[in-house]
Amino acid sequence: MEDLNSRYGLNPAHSEVVQACQVIAPCAALDMGCSNGRNALYLHQQGFDVTAVDANSNAIGMLQSIVQQEDIRTIQPRVYDLNDAALDADYGFIACTVTLMFLDMSRVGAVLSDMQDHTLPGGYNLIVCAMDTAEYPCPMNFPFTLKPGELSAIYQGWDLVKYNEDPGTMHNGARLQFATLLARKPL
């Protein structure tokens, strides 16, 4: 099967989304902050039924165009402001990669709580978010960054399938520390 991302000039799916698909069976998935759909298209090709949301209507329009051209019935692109923290469905997998740091700092707690509330029992949340630490001061002026241990504390009581706070590189070359979490909600 040809890779849809390369066909449409999109970046490959985030490496953590690809790794998560080794653990998570296809189910109803939510791609939060989907941009032009690199993760949503990958999840679709892995058999997931994907709702892809982003506040950027142009990005959603691009994804909608791909969905129509390819006659994809398992991706529903929707314009949605993540700051609203008002999800209206439950999912087996919610991916939020390199998105939280662009949200309104005062809304991140509500967004994470809403994600948890709308994850089915036994379902998964995947989060990758920039950090601002003494070792790696964040070089970008993001509205929000995580502190050490903050994300794992928010997911206390969930099974942490994967958790690290490792240095990484943004697509623009900036070096910073990221919190990466794949957590399973208790049954």
Image (tube, grey):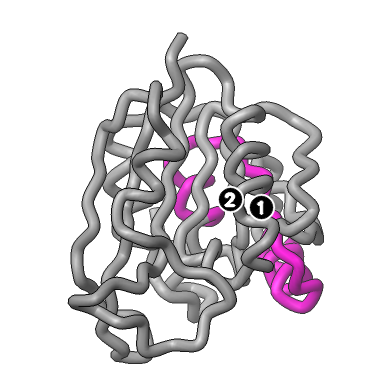
Q: In the rendering, at what x and y percent does residue 61 appear?
A: 78, 71
Q: Nearer the viewer, residue 183 or 7?
A: 183
Secondary structure beneath disc 1? strand
Residue projecting furthest to the front: 134
Residue identified by numbered label 1: 52
Which segment is the magenta one? 40-68
The disc labelled 2 sits on which kind of residue? Answer: Asp
Q: In the rendering, at what x and y percent does residue 50 appear?
A: 62, 42
Residue identified by numbered label 2: 31
**Which label is found at residue 141?**
none
Residue at image coords 62%, 66%: 105
Instruction: Check whether the beta carbons of the residues at disc 1 and disc 2 lie within 8 A of each other.
Output: yes
Residue at image coords 36%, 68%: 131
Residue projecting furthest to the top: 187
Q: In the rendering, at what x and y percent does residue 26 appear?
A: 46, 29
The disc labelled 1 sits on which kind of residue? Answer: Ala
- The relative height of residue 75 versus residue 142 in the rendered view (above or below) is above
Q: Nearer the viewer, residue 48 or 72?
A: 48
Which mark is first along the chain, 2 or 1?
2
Q: In the rendering, at what x and y percent does residue 10 appear?
A: 49, 76
Residue 131 among those drawn in magenta: no
Rounded to the nearest whole Å, what is the CA distance between mark 1 and mark 2? 5 Å
- The relative height of residue 178 versus residue 152 in the rendered view (above or below) is below
Residue at image coords 48%, 46%: 43
Secondary structure beneath disc 2? strand
Quadrant of residue 20 within the rendered picture = top left
